[in-house]
Amino acid sequence: MSTKQRNAKPARTTQTAGCAAALALCALTAPLTAAPQEPAEQRQVTPPPAGFQPAGPFIDGPPAPVPPATINRDASGGATVRAIRLDEPLRLDGVLDEPIYARVEPFGGFIQQSPDEGAPATEGTDNWILFDDESIYVGARVYESVPESEWVANEMQRDSFRIINNDGYIVVFDTFYDRRNGFAFRVNPIGGFSDRQITDEGDPNRDWNPVWDSRTGRFDGGWTVEMAIPFKSLRFRPGAEQLWGIQLGRDIRSNYEEAYLTAVPISAGPGQFRLSVAGTLVGLEVPADSRTFEIKPYAIGSLNTDRTVVPPISNDGDGSGGVDVKYGLTENLTADFTYNTDFAQVEVDEQQINLTRFSLFFPEKREFFLESQGIFDFGRVAGFGGFGGSARAILNAPPGVFPPGDAPTLFFSRRIGLDQGGRTVPILGGGRLTGKVGDFSVGAINIQTDDARTSDALPTNFSVLRVKRDILRRSRVGAIFTNRSVSTRGDGANQAYGLDGSFSFYDNVNMYGYYARTNTPGLEGRNESYQAAFSYEGDLYGLLVDHLQVGRNFNPEIGFMRREDFRRSYVYAQFSPRPEGIEAVRQFTWGGSVDYIENGDGQLETRILSGRFQTNFENSDNLSADILQDYEFLPRPFEIIDGVTIPIGGYEFTDFQVSYSLGPHRRVAGGLSFQHGEFFAGDITAVGYSRGLIEVSRQFAVEPGISWNRITMPQGNFTARVATTRLTYGFTPRMFASALLQYNSTNNVLSTNVRLRWEYQPGSELFIVYNDQRDTFMNLRNRGGFPMLENRAFVVKLTRQFRF
């Protein structure tokens, strides 16, 4: 029977937020050994048929379906589904022509998260969960009522961020059944795929790259998908019989719609991450020993030129090799080892313009440090909250993206293997231990670096230990310790340590905080930092209250701090109605905030009053207008660019910005912005085009971006420009070529990064990389000619994974 039509609209139990503070206090004071019951999202469970006794641990949802049924639902939108053991091999081709698909009844009945929360999905989906002794399989028949020409499927590159803007079929497994962590897999109609590791209902790590495979096909009325995920690519509790959480979903871009197997509140943000309301998977059996053992050696050859070092290097040939080892100590605890680690295949950092007196943040891109990185996050709000995710974004976003005063990061992996100037420091080797032991998530890293001929870095050992414990339904507490054997401030080592907690109640109420200290030679006293925040993250209303303090001598040297020695108080509120009488508009948002920052001596340094009006259209376009009134006190002269210095003093200025974003599903997409107003003692006019996309074909895309800023001040006038263009061609989902071209006028850099990546078999890759950086200032001084070469590299790297 097809599941194309469903009529039942699940009821949702609403909870008042008035008890939130009392519940939070109880959570903070409850013993960790207790088994508290959180009064959030408790479903009414349908009684099982007479005489039916499901085996195994407690099911958080409807009872297990009675064979031959493959799904059982309850009145609130919960679901329990049954996995079917294969009695014959499954050919992975996306055709769904094996007898099992005719013999076993599919399940479906997806429920909209947006735009019509709780309504049946507008398109049907037939689903099967199958398994054998090696892998778990997912098969789906994905119905589409629009012709294929109207499907949004233009991304073939594996793990591309843009794939979330395509039509997609989504599978999430909560393998520990802890209702907060999981592994997500996505496939689009043309075979593009991605995978993510979910931590604490958020922090999706899209750089987790397990071994798995998928195929897609077509049928009259839609498309099909088959996935095969080896048990060795996952982690789970010991024991043959398993109880997992499961979420299945659809992104239907023709309707700008998200729908899932279970009911997910519209205020939850991306529904695939709200694992506390996911379904339950029963009937699954895993092999007796599914521990991972992988060996991945690599060989690399390079040709390098660097004219910025003394003595200069010209066409210097080099070759080396190394190895990574992954070993499953148990089914749920994994050790990783690396020797002579190399990251030559990583894409270069994107250029940014910095018009503030604080450091810019550049994200980690190296694979070894990206895998399981969510375990090491400290002082982060759990999950993706409402506001469309705004509250969490404001608290957790990298410094330099959101307003100044963001909390420091105690562990920032770019401090390992890179010096203060961003130059590479050799990594001799190291290890990592990650996994789950009962209700505890654990992570440990130890890395040893060497000195480098291109910098003054000394051989240094880096250690990190992180422990988190799940409490209540969606909450956690944790601790972290970091150690750097050679401090950057003098003789001796640097340590940082702290405690943090995140408490989530009902659908929308969150409390969060941390306390941390550091030890640094020569820096005594005022070496602590703490933060406390409360948020209500509803779809209609939102409120965030945050207080943060960072001491003068707080110095996490394996972390990142944008600002030192300050106290910050921040309040943000918004109202976001969904008008029923305006057909073209999905949601309006009115928001405002106050950001108040004093230095450690109590002097006001920053005060920002902001207001925003935003319109989200039904076609996924977005229009926003912002006004900011800013006060900045400069305690010392601020050289904003070479030759232009703003003197000490207080400055009050106001500016206005308007932006329009074209929906990401369009063939031409991106955000256009215009800013005009005062800037310190002068004026600013800025024009930008960001997150640009021009879809030339389903395999070839151009991603342009530009930022043009004209500043006029009594101290001098200047124009800051950044232009980027990324070209990407996908040969297959496992093979692509890309070129990133960048120009930054503030540091006179013209750079080129060209990469070919071929995953010639799952887990094994070939990289061919060319990097080129040139100085445009010397070109101007010499009145023409091609910009002067600073450094250049040509690299070939081959990896081969052996799995036992």
Image (cartoon, rainbow, N blue to C red):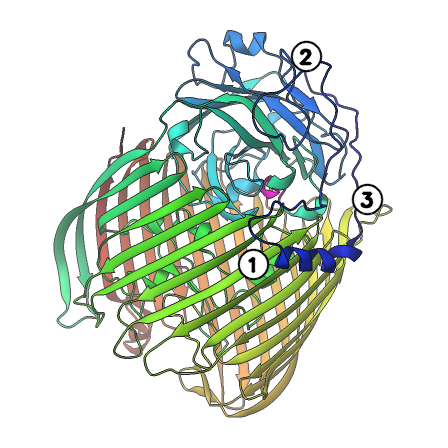
- Mark positioned earlier in the residue sequence (3 or 2): 2
Q: Quadrant of residue 254?
A: top right
532 or 296, which lies in front? 532
696 or 682, which lies in front? 682
Residue 719, percent from left and from top: 48, 76
For disc 2, the neighbor class at 10 Å (few under 14, some 14 to 19, many from 20) is few
User: Could you tell me if residue 534 is visible in this image?
Assistant: yes
Task: Name the residue tied to disc 2.
Answer: 1
Point out the residue furthest to the bottom here. Answer: 648
Which amino acid type is shown beneath numbered disc 3?
Answer: Glu
Asked if residue 83 is among those painted magenta in the image, a careful observer would answer no
- Mark positioned earlier in the residue sequence (1 or 3): 1
Which amino acid type is shown beneath numbered disc 2?
Answer: Met
Magenta part, dominant SS: helix
Residue 546, percent from left and from top: 64, 68
State if disc 2 and disc 3 touch (CB < 8 Å). Answer: no
User: Could you tell me if residue 143 is visible in this image?
Assistant: no
Q: CA distance from mark 1 to mark 2?
A: 47 Å
Name the disc covering residue 583, or none: 3
87 or 424, which lies in front? 87
Which part of the image, by quadrant, shows the N terminus?
top right
Q: Residue 618, relative to residue 763: is it above or below?
A: below
Task: Please tell me whether mark 3 sits on a helix, a strand or a loop.
Answer: loop
The residue range painted magenta reads 270-274
Task: Please tell me whether mark 2 sits on a helix, a strand or a loop.
Answer: loop
Q: CA distance from mark 1 to mark 3?
A: 42 Å
Q: CA distance from mark 3 to mark 2?
A: 35 Å
Name the disc covering residue 501, or none: 1
Mark in the foreground, 3 or 2: 2
